[in-house]
Amino acid sequence: MSAPQSNPPVKPCPPTVAELQHQARAQLEEIIASCSNPPGPVSFLEFETALLGLLRSLGCVLIQLFLRACHDRLDPAEWHARGYRTADPAAERTLQTSCGEVAYPRAYLVPRYGGGPGVPPLDVALGLTRDGFSPLIIGWFCRLATRVSFQIASELGGMFLGAAPPSSAIEEWVLGLARPAYVYLSDGPLPEDDGDVLVIEIDGTAIPTATDQEMQRRRQPQARCERGCKCQRHRGRAKRKRRGRKKRRKKGDKSKNGRSATLVVMYTLRRGEDGRLHGPINKKVFGTFGARKSALKWARAQATRRGFPPGTNKTVQIVVDGETCLEQRLRRLFRGAILTLDIRHAQEKLWEVGRLFHREGSAELTCWVEELVELLSKGHVRALLGRLEEAWRGISSRGPGTKEKREVLKRVTDYLEARVTLMDYGRLRKQDLVIATGVVEGAARYVVGERMDNSGMRWLEERAEAVLLLRCIEVNGDWEAFMRWSQEQRNRELQRGKVVQIRSKTPIQLPDAA
């Protein structure tokens, strides 16, 4: 006699549209009743907390109703004609939404011949990826991650949504979502109603990156558990003993191990009836940890797209920090543009010279430097250089400390002499043009510093690049447009029958990386 065979468990029948409509109406009536007839005296805090839970529950039912109605209207004939067959007419899936976790059935199709990835037509029609989270939720957490750390973004999500993905998932979403960000920043929609003068400010700023020793330590196999006490005070003591005490850094040792990002801020100015230039108008920020020439190419392409092509008769001004190689590249890319050295950099050089002759904080130092700064601001650079040469000749060639003074003064004089054409500040001020990189300096602090230069952070350039690109998009005010654009790109891939997932562990490649 054969052993009795157990039947497989019967899959519960998914609710129909009519059943979900009835359930939604019942929950709505419950919410109305709880608002109009509260059970006894309650505080507003208790009422609002209970109401939020009821609304989330109703939202889950409404999302189920929407998904079920879309599934019933869907005709799989198109996919059958493309060589697919139905493998499971009601494959269940769980989706994390803004209201909570929602389970819904949908047909699952596989290729009739030759194998290959399966296709759920409902997910394709609605633009749902394999991530298991709605596009809105993914966009929310990625946008949070452009402003705060991945861990804080996860904690904030759990605080307001009741549940949140781990920080590792948010980081991988950022890596995947930033993959097409270069294309959007280069070919995205152009701003309207630009001004008459285009201003481009370029600067660099560094973030702390992981050293080779830190990366080697991270890649070593980690012990699964340690013996001894597991309380917060004592855990990790054995690990610290194996590692040894950290060596105290000497004065001047840099612990940041900084890697520089190039920032470009582009905006326009419009001359008003008073003859002055007003703005900034349509300010856009771009940053990259790749080669600096990639940022300059982006600036050249965007200037052309915004109506300032090579050889234009319009005014184009570029304000830089004075690097010689940067000046040479800009002159090749922007022929006829007005190149300007940030006046703050020149003033810093003058203060450096002033400290050679006068005590720090003294009135004599301030008076001496202000006289030179006045010459600089009026554009009398040759007179300024004459004053510096006179000071250099007044230093004795012998005596304690004179050699250092002569070297510093010679270095500053050579620096300014090589950039005379970039310091016509008198003419620039008469034309009401820009003489300092205040806009890009502020962008460096806000876009890069506030997010990626915090205590304890150690970045890899390829992973920091993804955060920087998305942060530029968010700061530019283009986040919603970028999410719609990227969703359209994913929809095209889904329609071609590809397996699409935003989450990725592979960092993006830096542009023009040598």
Image (cartoon, rainbow, N blue to C red):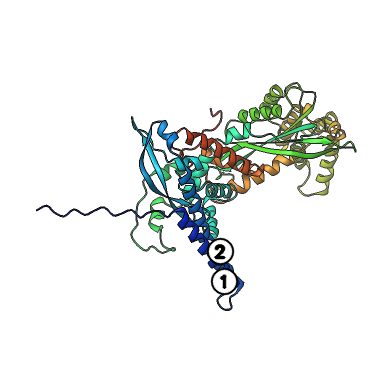
Residue 312 image offset from top left, x and y in percent: 77, 23
Which amino acid type corresponds to the residue marked 2 in the rendered image?
Answer: Leu
Q: Which image quadrant is residue 477 in?
A: top right
Residue 345 image offset from top left, x and y in percent: 74, 37
Which one is nearer the viewer's eye here, 243 or 26?
26
Q: Is residue 487 visible?
A: yes
Which one is nearer the viewer's eye here, 400 or 373?
373
Mark 1 and mark 2: span between their CA atoms?
Answer: 10 Å
Q: Residue at x 41, y 38 (%)?
A: 119
Q: Is residue 174 above or below residue 156?
A: above
SS at circle 2: helix
Q: Is residue 116 above or below residue 127?
A: above
Which amino acid type corresponds to the residue marked 1 in the rendered image?
Answer: Glu
Disc 2 designates what residue? 52
Which one is nearer the viewer's eye here, 331 or 62?
62
Q: Which image quadrant is residue 342 in?
A: top right
Q: Which image quadrant is residue 260 in?
A: top right
